Every structure is written in C-alpha cells, then in structure tokens.
Amino acid sequence: MNRCKLILVAIFLMLGLVAGIILQNSLFAAFCVVSAALAILIPFVLVIGAIAVFQMIIHNHRFKKTIRYLLLIGCSSILSLVVLLATGGSINRWKIKAVESYVSHAVLILDQIKAKTGVYPPELPINVIGEPPSLLRYYGSYYATPESFCFEYIDEPAGWAGGEGFLKFESSRREWTDDR
C-alpha cells in the first residue's frame, strides 16, 4: 500500500478515536449513529467490493483506481466507527471503575465516622474522602440515615437515562445492585 493510502487509513482511524473521546458522555447516542452508519457503509463496501472483483475478472482498468480508493475509504470508515465505539466504551468502563474505587474507599471512611460518632454523616465528607468521580458528581448521589448510607448513579452516558434505574451501593448489603 502506498503512503497516500496509509495516510488516508490513519486519518480515518484517528477520526474514530477523537470522536470516541469527544462523544464519551453521549455513548448511547454514538452507538445509535454508528449503527445507522454501519447499516449504510457495510452494503456500500460489499457493492464496491463486488464491483472491484468484477473489474478484476474482466480486466477493465478504467475504474480500477477509483474503486480501490472507494473500497479503502469504506473499510477505513467501518474501522473508524469500531474505534469510536471501542474508545467510548473503554472510557465509560474506566469511569465506572473510578466510581467503584471511590465508593470502596469512602465506605472505609464512612464506617470510621460511624464508629466515632455513632451515625453515618448526612452529607458526604468530601474534605476527608475527596471529590467524587464524574459519574457520581453529575449523575449520582449519596444519602444517609443514622444507620445506613447509599451511593447511587445512573449510567447516563451509556444510555441509561430518564430514571430507568440506578446502580446502587447500599451499606446494608455491601455490594452493588443494578435495578435498571
């Protein structure tokens, strides 16, 4: 493959990577767009591929270069969309792990506070625990009674918006539950 084609493929893959980073907070919308684009691009690539095979069979070199570039652009676009979803999904999984790590750290501190005062704090002691990760800050909450506490959030970037359910960590169970 010549340099021009390699540069073209690299540009499409970088576009997918950058789009995945930009669209990380609207992962579900990106998934819908990618699904629609793939529904158009895959048949496009198959048709162009069939034309390329047909051109090779009859040895008509008239459109050969154009068809190769169209095939390369179509395949690169499909790879770019796959990279977009993989990037956005990876970032979302990283954010979920950040929430789980933060909550496991917070549980230890909240238990220490209850051991000292006899009750869980009604407000999250951010000065002691630290600032919550973005999923908890923007899509979640902490609430407590004197005997228990709960962290919950909606994984809205992945498409679980509109009160369809929460991912919860309740002090009574000491585990995450998913009631989506």
Image (cartoon, grey):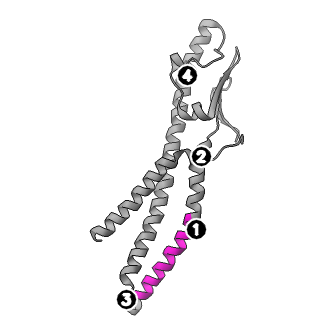
Residue 50 is one of the magenta-drawn residues:
yes
Label 1 sits on what residue type?
Ala
**Quadrant that contains the N terminus:** bottom left
Q: Nearer the viewer, mark 1 or mark 4?
A: 1
**Residue at image mark 1:** 39
Whether residue 53 is situated above or below residue 74 in the rendered picture: below
Q: Earlier in the sequence, mark 1 or mark 3?
A: 1
User: What is the secondary structure assignment of the residue under circle 4?
Assistant: helix
Q: Position of residue 28 (x, y in %)?
A: 60, 50
Q: Nearer the viewer, mark 1 or mark 3?
A: 3
Mark identifier at residue 151: none
Label 2 sits on what residue type?
Ala
**Residue at image mark 3:** 62
Q: What's the residue at 65%, 32% (across, down)?
A: 168
Distance, label 3 to label 2, CA atoms, is 47 Å
Residue 28 is one of the magenta-drawn residues:
no
Q: Earlier in the sequence, mark 1 or mark 2?
A: 1
Distance, label 3 to label 4, CA atoms, is 68 Å
Q: Position of residue 77 (x, y in %)?
A: 46, 65
**Residue at image mark 2:** 158
Q: Are marks 3 and 4 in contact (CB under 8 Å)?
A: no
Q: Is residue 55 left or right of residue 25?
A: left
Distance, label 1 to label 3, CA atoms, is 29 Å
**Residue at image mark 4:** 106
Label 4 sits on what residue type?
Ala
Q: Nearer the viewer, mark 3 or mark 2?
A: 3
Q: Earlier in the sequence, mark 2 or mark 4?
A: 4
